[in-house]
Amino acid sequence: MLVNIVAFGNERDGFSEDSQQSSLIYTYLGRSALISQIDSSLSASHVGIPVFTEYQACVFGNVRLVVRDCPVWDIFDSDWYTSRSLIGGADIIVIKYSINDRTSFQELKDNYVPMIKKALNLCSVPVIISAIGARKNGVPCTCPLCTSDRRSCVTTTEGVQLAKELGATYLELHALNDFYIQNYFGGVLEYFMIQSLNQKSSEKMKTRKKIQKCHRIQPPQLEQPEKMPILKGEASHYDADLHNLLCCCQCADVAFYPEDLSTVVEAHKIILCSASHLFMLLFGVKSPADIRDASIVRTARTLFAVEAGAALPPDPHGVPACVPPVRVVVKDSVFFSCLPDILHFIYSGAFQWEQLEEDTKKKLKDPEKTEHVLEKVKCILKTPGKLSTVKDCKSHQIKRLYNNSLRLFFNTPVLADVIFKIQDATVPAHRAVLVARCEVMAAMFNGNYLEANSILVPVYGVSKDTFLSFLEYLYTDSCCPASILQAMSLLVCAEMYQVMRLQHICELYIITQLQSMPSRELASTSLSIVSLLKKAKFHNSDCLSTWLLHFIATNYLIFSQKPEFQDLSGNLSITFQTRNIFQFCLDQRQGTG
């Protein structure tokens, strides 16, 4: 989208002693919170004479704004081609003059207004007439070299009459300060910008209908997290998070040893148990009666031995005290030599079977030993009561996604080693999963903080339901909010713990729900969109706050009738600007503007 603005006239008093006075356009572009990425250049006319300054910027986030400021009226005399082109290509025209320069005003009225009216007959463009300056009611100069009325002020009546001739909006700006520039002139100008964008969108829609491509024009949409430019590369990194946990060995609670205890390989019970019934049996999560598979029980007993006294039962609250890692002796030396590769295979999601085969062959260089180790791995990954064949171990058959397996351990005391206390309730969890999936919790549990050595960790600022939804995402990599308000609460929690992908999923959910709301439901809903905007801004959700701002602007007739519309405060400068635009629109509709 592109908005073209052309400004004619000089707002400076030709006899003013203030030669440093800034121009109206330059001051607005510099102070408006809606404007960004400003660039300026001096442009020449058709005949090569520099007659106007061109500014290029962005407005409303992603709309290109081009402003051409022509302070000299001579362009209409010297180059009618350029002046006609400027007016013909304009979406908004601004005419400026100084209240204290009657000579320039009279010249504008007599010589140039007829030319502008002639050019405007060919197009319908909103015009803003800006009378600038505070009236100086001093005694006119009596010097014979001066015109007798050059110090006379242009009256409001004369300005309004000129506006009527052009069908323009008349504004008096007594000073180029924040109030007159941003709240008054800026509000009117930005209203016409929105009108222009709406008109262009409507024309674009009609064109699409003609070619049978009916895509309803909507406020800017967010793409899926995997494709969102602002989060480039933020595709799901669930498997990578768990694999990195093995590499860094944080919160490891299992230590595998060979029979000679010469070396050690560390791992995590929660990850192993989520992938294997054999490890559930080994670490006491399930009993042989639960497994009901003799081959799994036999392999567990012949391959591993848990050192007596290493695995302590849970306390009455369901969570064991902090203990050293469980020591597990691997009775098969050949299997132990391949254990690091096997663990990498399991932590990567247990679906890269071909890669494990290749790595094992390279390491052992013995077909019989290779087959022996791979058979053990098949038994470890075996589902009770089913045969484990070579076909079952192919990538498309054996794929075990942890987001399904870890769900079994979500919000249960089984293998839990930390308890969160929230609103007089407790939620069990597993440090390994938290550390792998959340950098803030990784720092909390591994740094010099009280939580690093505590079983009970208090949580403040979120409700139990919201925190449970947050933990569910960490365990399963999925999020299903029940409502927009719940999604916003979850977004706040995600921002607190710096889980950016979850924050973006919540943004996407909120936007999708609002986009699907019919206008009638949007008008009657008790949901405060303004409150959502404030929360999004406060919690650094720039993508959502920008979209909500466009959404409110697009539906300003609906939101202007709601009490919450008056709650837009100056604490959010961009929102404050928008409120002025909306209020002006409302006043115009009510006939008071």
Image (tube, rainbow, N blue to C red):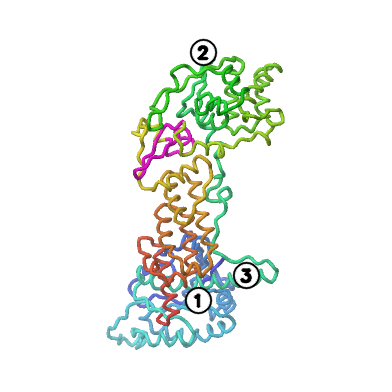
Residue 27 falls within the magenta-colored stretch:
no
Q: Amino acid at mark 2?
A: Ser
The local secondary structure at tag 2 comes to: loop
Residue 58: image x %, image y %? 50, 62
Mark 2, mark 3: which one is toward the viewer? 2
Q: State how far apart marks 2 and 1 are (Cα).
A: 84 Å
- 114 shown above or below 293: below
Nearest to viewer (mark 1 / mark 3):
3
On the image, numbered disc 2 is attached to which residue?
A: 262
Q: Residue furthest top?
A: 260
Q: Earlier in the sequence, mark 1 or mark 3?
A: 1
Residue located at (66% from left, 68% from top): 208
Q: Which residue is mark 1?
A: 93
- Given the image, on which type of amino acid does mark 3 rest? Met
Segment colored magenta: 415-442
Q: Position of residue 373 (x, y in %)?
A: 65, 20
Task: Label 3: state its secondary structure.
Answer: helix
Residue drawn 41% across and 84% down?
159
In this rendering, the answer to whether 167 lies above or below 562 is below
| Image location of residue 287, percent across then percent down | 53, 26
Q: Earlier in the sequence, mark 2 or mark 3?
A: 3
Residue assigned mark 3: 205
